[in-house]
Image (cartoon, rainbow, N blue to C red):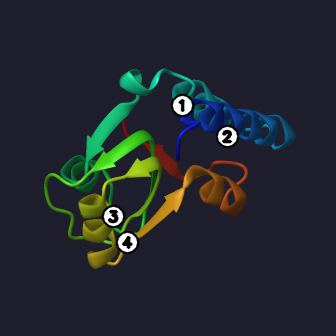
Amino acid sequence: MGVNEKKEREKLALELKKTAIANDSRFWEDIAKRIRKSKDSLVEVNVGKISRYASADSTVVVPGVVLGAGRIEEPVKVAALYFSKSAKSKIEEAGGKTLTLNELMNENAKGTKIKIIG
């Protein structure tokens, strides 16, 4: 996200809310509320925490920033607003996948079998 990141988050939150209504999904509605917070209030989650709470081949959403501290050794699909370079490379080196929230929403409109961390 760039210069107008607050506007971008608002736009994304609106899309998430529309998907929530269209698919009767409280999951995406909850994520929309969480990303509307100020940038300073967004959650920051390290890959080590994702590793502790997510099992292999699971899908995780971080409604904020994923940072690179810690280790991750199992393939996990992670969607977030932002990824640090080290977090992205650690997740991908473990065989996992990094996604934007929009990409995951398009993949799983109902928001089923997704764990929120943060």
SS at badge 3: helix
Name above or below for residue 40 compared with residue 3.
Answer: above
Among the two numbered marks 2 and 3 on one chain, the one whose residue lies closer to the N terminus: 2
* Residue pointed to by mark 4: 96
Element carrying mark 2? helix
Residue situated in front as seen by the camera: 80 or 2:
2
The percent coordinates of residue 116 (x first, y second) are: 45, 41
Q: What amino acid is at disc 1?
A: Ile
Q: Residue at x 67, y 53 (%)?
A: 105
Among the two numbered marks 4 and 2 on one chain, the one whose residue lies closer to the N terminus: 2
Vertical arrangement, residue 57 with respect to residue 36, above or below? below
Asked if disc 4 and disc 1 are in contact, CB closer than 8 Å, the reply is no
- Judging by the rendered image, the residue that carries numbered circle 3 is 88
Instruction: For marks 2 and 3, give the CA distance.
Output: 21 Å
Which of the 4 quarters of the picture holds residue 25?
top right
Image coordinates of residue 69 in percent, x first then y, are 15, 51
Residue 80 locus on image (x, y percent): 47, 49
Badge 2: residue crowd in 10 Å (few <14, some 14–19, many ≥20): some
In-front residue for pair 39/110: 39
Q: Residue 12's mark?
A: 2
- Between residue 57 and residue 32, name the one nearer to us: 32
Could you tell me if the residues under marks 1 and 2 are in contact, i.e. CB atoms within 8 Å?
yes
Hey, what amino acid is under mark 3?
Lys
